[in-house]
């Protein structure tokens, strides 16, 4: 597991807890040599996370649509900045560069992006873990809604289980690492069975 795609707000928000989680995640990813893939902006929680990774010696791939680059939103100090034409291209590129998806607190864009990643997992376009970092209870209502969708018979329990939950940046990274360790074990077992 080499890269995590992180979705998060282009605003810093009103809670210091969310800022601390973004900073903590950035430090941890750099320390663990996990590359960051994110939306390429220099503002809000997005900029805070990218700066934290870079300050601690990590690598950052930003992916930004051309119209946002023109608005002077792009971070100009990243390891790599990929400029694409559309939001659809942006999301596809971010997913193609990463081994997992992680959502920190955010608004429409964050929710849309993590739910697209979850939908792709649901229809088996990928097997990448999708985690929501529930900083300071930010996603409590969302998880209750997902349980409600299951109770209404509109979301299958096994698909609800795809939306993994973490309380801290460290637990989010550990969950992703554990999922990938299990997948690597499965691959090794499969390869060994072919050698017999």
Image (cartoon, rainbow, N blue to C red):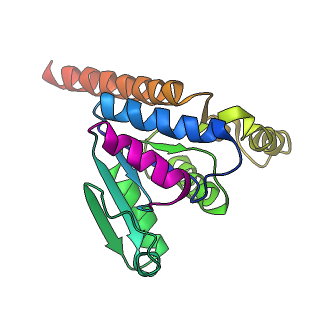
Quadrant into which the N terminus falls? top left
Q: What residue is shown at x 31% (from left), y 21% (from top)?
A: 185
Taking the image as shown, residue 66 lies to the left or right of residue 22, namely left
Range of the magenta residues? 42-57
> What is the quadrant of residue 160 in the picture?
top right
Q: Quadrant of the C terminus?
A: top left
Determine whether 148 is above or below 86 in the image: above
Name the dominant secondary structure of the magenta segment: helix
Asked if residue 6 is positioned above or below residue 180 in the image, the reply reads below
Furthest residue toward left: 195
Choose between 184 and 66: the one closer to the eye: 66
Residue 119: x %, y % from top left: 57, 53
Residue at 32 percent of width and 64 percent of height: 76
Q: Nearer the viewer, residue 100 or 133?
A: 133
> Residue at image x 30%, y 67%?
82
Asked if residue 93 shows in the view, the reply is no
* Residue 97 image point, x, y percent: 32, 53
Q: How many marks?
A: 0
User: Can see residue 100?
Assistant: yes
Residue 43 drawn in magenta: yes
Residue 54 is one of the magenta-drawn residues: yes
Q: Position of residue 126 (x, y in %)?
A: 42, 48
């Amino acid at each position: 597991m080499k890269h995590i795609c992180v979705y998060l707000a282009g605003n810093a928000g009103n809670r210091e807890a969310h800022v601390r989680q973004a900073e903590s995640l950035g430090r941890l990813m750099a320390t663990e040599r996990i590359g960051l893939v994110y939306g390429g902006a220099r503002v809000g929680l997005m900029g805070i996370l990218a700066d934290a990774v870079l300050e601690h010696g990590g690598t950052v791939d930003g992916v930004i649509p051309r119209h946002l680059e023109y608005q002077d939103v792009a971070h100009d100090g990243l390891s790599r900045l990929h400029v694409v034409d559309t939001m659809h291209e942006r999301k596809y590129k971010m997913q193609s560069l990463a081994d997992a998806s992680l959502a920190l607190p955010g608004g429409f864009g964050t929710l849309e992006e993590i739910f697209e990643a979850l939908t792709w997992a649901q229809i088996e376009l990928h097997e990448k873990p999708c985690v929501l970092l529930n900083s300071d209870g930010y996603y409590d209502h969302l998880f209750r809604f997902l349980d409600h969708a299951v109770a209404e018979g509109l979301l299958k329990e096994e698909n609800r289980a795809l939306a993994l939950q973490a309380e801290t940046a460290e637990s989010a990274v550990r969950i992703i690492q554990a999922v990938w360790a299990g997948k690597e074990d499965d691959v090794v077992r499969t390869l060994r069975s072919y050698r017999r």
